[in-house]
Image (cartoon, rainbow, N blue to C red):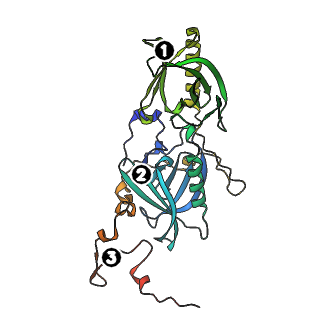
Amino acid sequence: MYKMSKAKKGVVWEDREVLFDLPFDFLKLRAGEKVFDRIEPIEDTKGNSGMKGRLVVTNLRIIWHSLGSPRINLSIGLNCFLSTNTKIVNSGLRGTTQALYVLAGYRTNKYEFVFTNLSPNCVRHYTSVVGVHKSYAVSRLYRDLKLRGAFIHNKQLRVLPLEKISLNESGIWNLSSESGNLGTMIVSNVRIVWYADINDAFNISMPYITIESIAIRDSKFGEALVIVIRATSGGYVLGFRADPKEKLRPLLTELQTLHQAYTERPVFGVEMNWGTEVAKPSHDFIEELEEIGEPRGEMGPSLYLASQQAHSREDSEIQPVYNSYLGLAIEPLKDGFTLKSLFEVQTSS
Protein backbone atom coordinates (compact mmCIF):
# COMPACT_ATOMS: atom_id res chain seq x y z
CA MET A 1 0.00 0.00 0.00
CA TYR A 2 1.24 3.49 -0.86
CA LYS A 3 0.93 6.42 1.49
CA MET A 4 0.46 9.69 -0.35
CA SER A 5 1.56 12.89 1.36
CA LYS A 6 -0.87 15.80 1.31
CA ALA A 7 1.83 18.00 -0.21
CA LYS A 8 1.72 15.94 -3.42
CA LYS A 9 -1.92 16.63 -4.12
CA GLY A 10 -1.10 19.80 -6.06
CA VAL A 11 1.65 18.14 -8.13
CA VAL A 12 0.88 16.09 -11.23
CA TRP A 13 2.13 12.64 -10.19
CA GLU A 14 -0.26 10.42 -12.15
CA ASP A 15 1.94 10.05 -15.26
CA ARG A 16 5.24 9.67 -13.38
CA GLU A 17 4.61 6.98 -10.76
CA VAL A 18 3.74 3.29 -10.55
CA LEU A 19 1.51 2.72 -7.52
CA PHE A 20 -0.47 -0.15 -6.01
CA ASP A 21 -3.63 -0.38 -3.93
CA LEU A 22 -4.39 3.31 -4.18
CA PRO A 23 -6.91 4.93 -1.83
CA PHE A 24 -10.26 5.91 -3.35
CA ASP A 25 -9.37 9.61 -3.71
CA PHE A 26 -6.31 8.88 -5.84
CA LEU A 27 -8.22 6.81 -8.36
CA LYS A 28 -10.33 9.86 -9.16
CA LEU A 29 -9.36 11.83 -12.25
CA ARG A 30 -7.47 15.03 -11.56
CA ALA A 31 -8.17 18.30 -13.38
CA GLY A 32 -7.22 17.89 -17.04
CA GLU A 33 -7.16 14.10 -16.88
CA LYS A 34 -9.62 12.43 -19.20
CA VAL A 35 -10.60 8.85 -19.97
CA PHE A 36 -9.92 7.63 -23.51
CA ASP A 37 -11.09 4.06 -23.08
CA ARG A 38 -12.51 1.57 -20.58
CA ILE A 39 -12.24 -2.14 -21.31
CA GLU A 40 -13.67 -5.02 -19.33
CA PRO A 41 -13.37 -7.77 -18.39
CA ILE A 42 -9.57 -7.57 -18.20
CA GLU A 43 -7.44 -9.93 -16.11
CA ASP A 44 -4.29 -8.69 -14.36
CA THR A 45 -2.65 -11.98 -15.18
CA LYS A 46 0.63 -11.54 -13.33
CA GLY A 47 -0.68 -10.10 -10.07
CA ASN A 48 -4.28 -11.29 -9.89
CA SER A 49 -4.71 -14.31 -12.14
CA GLY A 50 -8.30 -15.53 -12.23
CA MET A 51 -9.78 -12.16 -11.20
CA LYS A 52 -11.94 -10.07 -13.55
CA GLY A 53 -11.17 -6.36 -13.66
CA ARG A 54 -11.45 -3.16 -15.64
CA LEU A 55 -8.68 -1.38 -17.55
CA VAL A 56 -9.05 2.41 -17.75
CA VAL A 57 -6.85 4.31 -20.21
CA THR A 58 -6.41 8.06 -19.57
CA ASN A 59 -4.16 10.74 -21.00
CA LEU A 60 -1.80 10.34 -18.00
CA ARG A 61 -1.90 6.69 -16.93
CA ILE A 62 -3.55 3.32 -17.16
CA ILE A 63 -5.54 2.08 -14.19
CA TRP A 64 -6.58 -1.49 -13.49
CA HIS A 65 -8.95 -2.39 -10.68
CA SER A 66 -10.78 -5.54 -9.67
CA LEU A 67 -14.49 -5.48 -10.47
CA GLY A 68 -15.29 -7.45 -7.34
CA SER A 69 -12.91 -5.66 -4.94
CA PRO A 70 -11.97 -2.23 -6.35
CA ARG A 71 -9.55 -1.64 -3.48
CA ILE A 72 -7.30 -4.06 -5.41
CA ASN A 73 -5.95 -1.70 -8.05
CA LEU A 74 -2.87 -0.29 -9.71
CA SER A 75 -1.91 2.92 -11.53
CA ILE A 76 0.88 2.97 -14.17
CA GLY A 77 2.02 6.41 -15.32
CA LEU A 78 2.60 6.74 -19.07
CA ASN A 79 5.96 8.40 -18.42
CA CYS A 80 7.07 5.19 -16.66
CA PHE A 81 6.50 2.99 -19.72
CA LEU A 82 9.70 1.39 -21.02
CA SER A 83 8.11 -0.90 -23.61
CA THR A 84 4.86 -2.54 -24.67
CA ASN A 85 4.42 -5.82 -26.48
CA THR A 86 2.26 -8.90 -26.80
CA LYS A 87 3.10 -12.06 -24.89
CA ILE A 88 1.85 -15.63 -24.72
CA VAL A 89 0.73 -16.27 -21.14
CA ASN A 90 -1.17 -18.80 -19.10
CA SER A 91 -4.29 -16.96 -17.94
CA GLY A 92 -6.27 -18.18 -14.96
CA LEU A 93 -9.49 -17.49 -16.87
CA ARG A 94 -8.58 -18.12 -20.53
CA GLY A 95 -5.73 -20.62 -20.40
CA THR A 96 -2.85 -20.14 -22.85
CA THR A 97 -3.50 -16.93 -24.76
CA GLN A 98 -1.96 -13.71 -26.06
CA ALA A 99 -1.89 -10.75 -23.68
CA LEU A 100 -0.66 -7.15 -23.45
CA TYR A 101 2.77 -6.92 -21.80
CA VAL A 102 3.95 -3.62 -20.27
CA LEU A 103 7.43 -3.08 -18.86
CA ALA A 104 7.59 0.00 -16.62
CA GLY A 105 10.30 1.66 -14.56
CA TYR A 106 9.81 3.61 -11.34
CA ARG A 107 12.56 4.78 -9.04
CA THR A 108 15.14 1.97 -9.04
CA ASN A 109 12.78 -0.87 -9.96
CA LYS A 110 11.38 -2.34 -13.14
CA TYR A 111 7.89 -3.82 -13.15
CA GLU A 112 6.16 -6.21 -15.54
CA PHE A 113 2.41 -6.09 -16.09
CA VAL A 114 0.38 -8.57 -18.13
CA PHE A 115 -3.22 -7.76 -19.07
CA THR A 116 -5.41 -10.39 -20.71
CA ASN A 117 -8.63 -9.46 -22.48
CA LEU A 118 -11.24 -12.05 -21.53
CA SER A 119 -13.36 -11.25 -24.59
CA PRO A 120 -12.36 -13.65 -27.39
CA ASN A 121 -10.52 -12.16 -30.39
CA CYS A 122 -10.55 -8.65 -28.89
CA VAL A 123 -7.30 -6.64 -29.05
CA ARG A 124 -8.76 -3.28 -28.06
CA HIS A 125 -6.84 -3.19 -24.78
CA TYR A 126 -3.59 -3.43 -26.76
CA THR A 127 -4.45 -0.85 -29.43
CA SER A 128 -5.79 1.62 -26.86
CA VAL A 129 -2.79 1.45 -24.52
CA VAL A 130 -0.19 1.53 -27.30
CA GLY A 131 -1.99 4.35 -29.13
CA VAL A 132 -2.28 6.56 -26.05
CA HIS A 133 1.33 5.94 -25.07
CA LYS A 134 2.50 6.99 -28.54
CA SER A 135 0.43 10.17 -28.30
CA TYR A 136 1.93 10.85 -24.86
CA ALA A 137 5.47 10.35 -26.15
CA VAL A 138 5.12 12.80 -29.07
CA SER A 139 3.53 15.55 -26.95
CA ARG A 140 6.30 16.01 -24.37
CA LEU A 141 6.74 19.73 -25.15
CA TYR A 142 3.43 20.30 -23.34
CA ARG A 143 4.89 18.83 -20.13
CA ASP A 144 8.72 18.77 -20.21
CA LEU A 145 11.16 21.65 -19.83
CA LYS A 146 13.35 21.91 -22.92
CA LEU A 147 16.69 23.72 -23.34
CA ARG A 148 18.14 24.60 -26.76
CA GLY A 149 15.33 22.86 -28.62
CA ALA A 150 14.09 23.00 -32.21
CA PHE A 151 10.84 24.77 -31.29
CA ILE A 152 12.03 28.16 -32.65
CA HIS A 153 12.54 28.55 -36.41
CA ASN A 154 13.55 31.87 -37.96
CA LYS A 155 12.56 33.60 -34.71
CA GLN A 156 9.07 32.12 -34.93
CA LEU A 157 7.64 29.67 -32.39
CA ARG A 158 6.53 26.30 -33.74
CA VAL A 159 3.07 26.42 -32.19
CA LEU A 160 1.70 23.21 -30.69
CA PRO A 161 -1.77 21.98 -31.82
CA LEU A 162 -3.55 23.04 -28.60
CA GLU A 163 -1.43 26.13 -28.01
CA LYS A 164 -2.65 29.74 -28.18
CA ILE A 165 -0.20 32.64 -28.09
CA SER A 166 -1.08 35.32 -25.53
CA LEU A 167 1.98 37.57 -25.56
CA ASN A 168 5.09 38.22 -27.65
CA GLU A 169 7.40 40.49 -25.68
CA SER A 170 10.72 41.78 -27.02
CA GLY A 171 13.45 43.40 -24.92
CA ILE A 172 13.60 40.59 -22.33
CA TRP A 173 17.06 39.82 -20.96
CA ASN A 174 18.01 36.34 -19.76
CA LEU A 175 20.29 36.74 -16.73
CA SER A 176 22.06 33.38 -16.98
CA SER A 177 25.39 35.01 -17.91
CA GLU A 178 27.40 37.86 -16.38
CA SER A 179 26.21 40.39 -18.94
CA GLY A 180 22.83 38.83 -19.75
CA ASN A 181 21.43 37.94 -23.17
CA LEU A 182 18.87 40.08 -24.96
CA GLY A 183 15.95 38.14 -26.35
CA THR A 184 12.23 37.69 -26.81
CA MET A 185 9.68 36.03 -24.54
CA ILE A 186 6.65 34.28 -26.02
CA VAL A 187 3.82 33.42 -23.63
CA SER A 188 1.01 30.97 -24.42
CA ASN A 189 -1.70 29.05 -22.61
CA VAL A 190 0.64 26.09 -21.98
CA ARG A 191 4.19 27.46 -21.60
CA ILE A 192 6.68 30.32 -21.46
CA VAL A 193 9.33 30.40 -24.20
CA TRP A 194 12.41 32.63 -24.38
CA TYR A 195 15.03 32.82 -27.13
CA ALA A 196 18.08 35.00 -27.74
CA ASP A 197 17.74 37.57 -30.51
CA ILE A 198 21.30 37.00 -31.74
CA ASN A 199 20.92 33.20 -31.88
CA ASP A 200 17.44 31.70 -31.59
CA ALA A 201 18.96 28.22 -30.96
CA PHE A 202 19.81 29.56 -27.47
CA ASN A 203 16.35 29.12 -26.02
CA ILE A 204 14.21 27.54 -23.33
CA SER A 205 10.63 26.22 -23.21
CA MET A 206 9.00 26.12 -19.75
CA PRO A 207 5.57 24.47 -19.57
CA TYR A 208 3.47 25.80 -16.68
CA ILE A 209 3.30 22.25 -15.31
CA THR A 210 7.05 22.48 -14.56
CA ILE A 211 6.86 25.91 -12.87
CA GLU A 212 6.65 26.14 -9.10
CA SER A 213 6.50 29.95 -8.75
CA ILE A 214 6.84 33.23 -10.64
CA ALA A 215 7.84 36.38 -8.74
CA ILE A 216 9.93 39.56 -8.81
CA ARG A 217 13.12 39.65 -6.77
CA ASP A 218 16.11 41.95 -6.39
CA SER A 219 19.27 40.98 -8.26
CA LYS A 220 22.59 42.56 -9.22
CA PHE A 221 20.79 43.70 -12.38
CA GLY A 222 18.02 45.36 -10.34
CA GLU A 223 14.50 43.97 -10.18
CA ALA A 224 14.25 40.64 -11.99
CA LEU A 225 11.49 38.27 -12.94
CA VAL A 226 12.36 34.95 -11.28
CA ILE A 227 10.85 31.65 -12.47
CA VAL A 228 11.43 28.69 -10.16
CA ILE A 229 11.23 25.27 -11.81
CA ARG A 230 10.01 22.27 -9.81
CA ALA A 231 12.68 19.90 -8.52
CA THR A 232 11.17 17.07 -10.60
CA SER A 233 11.95 19.09 -13.75
CA GLY A 234 15.49 20.13 -12.85
CA GLY A 235 15.03 22.62 -10.00
CA TYR A 236 16.32 25.58 -12.04
CA VAL A 237 15.97 29.20 -10.92
CA LEU A 238 15.77 31.43 -14.00
CA GLY A 239 16.04 35.21 -13.99
CA PHE A 240 14.86 37.75 -16.57
CA ARG A 241 14.75 41.55 -16.70
CA ALA A 242 12.75 43.80 -18.98
CA ASP A 243 13.86 46.77 -21.05
CA PRO A 244 12.32 49.20 -20.28
CA LYS A 245 11.90 48.02 -16.67
CA GLU A 246 8.39 49.51 -16.43
CA LYS A 247 6.92 46.55 -18.32
CA LEU A 248 8.27 44.01 -15.80
CA ARG A 249 5.35 44.13 -13.35
CA PRO A 250 2.61 43.96 -16.03
CA LEU A 251 4.50 40.96 -17.44
CA LEU A 252 4.54 39.33 -13.98
CA THR A 253 0.78 39.82 -13.63
CA GLU A 254 0.15 38.24 -17.04
CA LEU A 255 2.37 35.24 -16.31
CA GLN A 256 0.88 34.62 -12.86
CA THR A 257 -2.65 34.80 -14.27
CA LEU A 258 -1.88 32.30 -17.04
CA HIS A 259 -0.03 30.02 -14.63
CA GLN A 260 -3.02 29.97 -12.29
CA ALA A 261 -5.44 29.37 -15.18
CA TYR A 262 -3.33 26.42 -16.32
CA THR A 263 -3.18 24.99 -12.81
CA GLU A 264 -6.98 25.01 -12.63
CA ARG A 265 -7.45 23.61 -16.16
CA PRO A 266 -4.24 21.97 -17.36
CA VAL A 267 -3.60 21.06 -20.99
CA PHE A 268 -1.49 17.89 -21.12
CA GLY A 269 -1.42 17.67 -24.92
CA VAL A 270 -2.35 13.98 -25.24
CA GLU A 271 -5.08 13.65 -27.84
CA MET A 272 -6.63 10.62 -29.52
CA ASN A 273 -8.99 10.33 -32.48
CA TRP A 274 -10.79 7.04 -32.14
CA GLY A 275 -13.19 7.57 -35.04
CA THR A 276 -16.32 5.46 -34.54
CA GLU A 277 -14.63 2.34 -33.19
CA VAL A 278 -14.58 3.27 -29.53
CA ALA A 279 -17.31 5.14 -27.71
CA LYS A 280 -15.73 7.79 -25.49
CA PRO A 281 -16.75 7.41 -21.83
CA SER A 282 -19.07 10.22 -20.84
CA HIS A 283 -18.24 10.37 -17.14
CA ASP A 284 -15.65 9.59 -14.50
CA PHE A 285 -15.39 5.80 -14.17
CA ILE A 286 -14.71 6.07 -10.44
CA GLU A 287 -18.17 7.48 -9.78
CA GLU A 288 -19.60 4.05 -10.65
CA LEU A 289 -17.70 2.39 -7.82
CA GLU A 290 -19.04 2.13 -4.35
CA GLU A 291 -16.77 3.20 -1.50
CA ILE A 292 -13.84 0.83 -1.91
CA GLY A 293 -12.66 0.87 1.70
CA GLU A 294 -9.12 1.09 2.98
CA PRO A 295 -6.45 -0.58 0.85
CA ARG A 296 -5.05 -3.68 2.52
CA GLY A 297 -1.93 -4.18 0.44
CA GLU A 298 -3.30 -7.29 -1.29
CA MET A 299 -1.15 -6.75 -4.38
CA GLY A 300 2.13 -5.13 -3.44
CA PRO A 301 4.97 -4.15 -5.80
CA SER A 302 6.93 -7.38 -5.29
CA LEU A 303 4.39 -9.35 -7.36
CA TYR A 304 5.27 -7.27 -10.42
CA LEU A 305 9.05 -6.92 -10.19
CA ALA A 306 10.54 -7.67 -13.58
CA SER A 307 11.77 -11.23 -13.72
CA GLN A 308 15.54 -11.59 -14.08
CA GLN A 309 15.78 -7.79 -14.42
CA ALA A 310 13.52 -7.78 -17.48
CA HIS A 311 15.31 -10.76 -19.02
CA SER A 312 18.70 -9.01 -19.05
CA ARG A 313 20.61 -11.86 -17.37
CA GLU A 314 22.45 -14.46 -19.40
CA ASP A 315 20.81 -17.89 -19.67
CA SER A 316 23.73 -19.38 -17.73
CA GLU A 317 22.65 -17.46 -14.65
CA ILE A 318 19.17 -19.00 -14.56
CA GLN A 319 19.04 -21.46 -11.69
CA PRO A 320 17.19 -24.81 -12.03
CA VAL A 321 14.13 -25.46 -9.89
CA TYR A 322 12.93 -28.72 -8.39
CA ASN A 323 9.84 -30.25 -10.02
CA SER A 324 7.99 -32.66 -7.73
CA TYR A 325 6.14 -34.33 -10.61
CA LEU A 326 9.34 -35.39 -12.37
CA GLY A 327 11.44 -35.65 -9.24
CA LEU A 328 14.12 -33.64 -11.03
CA ALA A 329 15.60 -30.15 -11.09
CA ILE A 330 14.66 -28.47 -14.38
CA GLU A 331 15.04 -25.08 -16.06
CA PRO A 332 12.12 -22.77 -15.17
CA LEU A 333 9.33 -22.99 -17.73
CA LYS A 334 8.71 -19.94 -19.90
CA ASP A 335 5.53 -17.94 -19.37
CA GLY A 336 2.53 -19.56 -21.05
CA PHE A 337 3.87 -23.11 -20.91
CA THR A 338 2.99 -25.97 -18.59
CA LEU A 339 4.80 -29.24 -18.03
CA LYS A 340 1.84 -31.10 -19.53
CA SER A 341 1.92 -29.05 -22.74
CA LEU A 342 5.57 -29.96 -23.33
CA PHE A 343 4.65 -33.63 -23.54
CA GLU A 344 1.59 -33.21 -25.76
CA VAL A 345 1.95 -34.52 -29.31
CA GLN A 346 0.69 -32.04 -31.88
CA THR A 347 -0.98 -33.72 -34.86
CA SER A 348 -2.26 -32.11 -38.01
CA SER A 349 -5.95 -32.58 -38.67
The residue where tag 1 is placed is 224
In the visual, does 6 lie left or right of 189? left
> Does 220 appear above or below 152?
above
Asked if labels 1 and 2 touch by Cβ distance under 8 angstroms, the answer is no
- Vertical arrangement, residue 59 with respect to residue 245, above or below: below
Amino acid type at mark 2: Gly
Q: Which residue is mark 3?
A: 331
**Residue 105, disc:** 2
Q: Residue flagged by tag 3: what amino acid is it?
A: Glu
Q: Which mark is residue 46?
A: none
Determine if residue 99 is in view. yes
Extreme residue in the right direction:
276
SS class, disc 2: strand
Q: CA distance from mark 2 to mark 1?
A: 39 Å
Q: Nearer the viewer, residue 5 or 113?
A: 113
Dot 1 falls on a residue whose secondary structure is strand
SS class, disc 3: loop
- The mark nearer the N terminus, 2 or 1, is 2
Q: Position of residue 100 (x, y in %)?
A: 52, 63
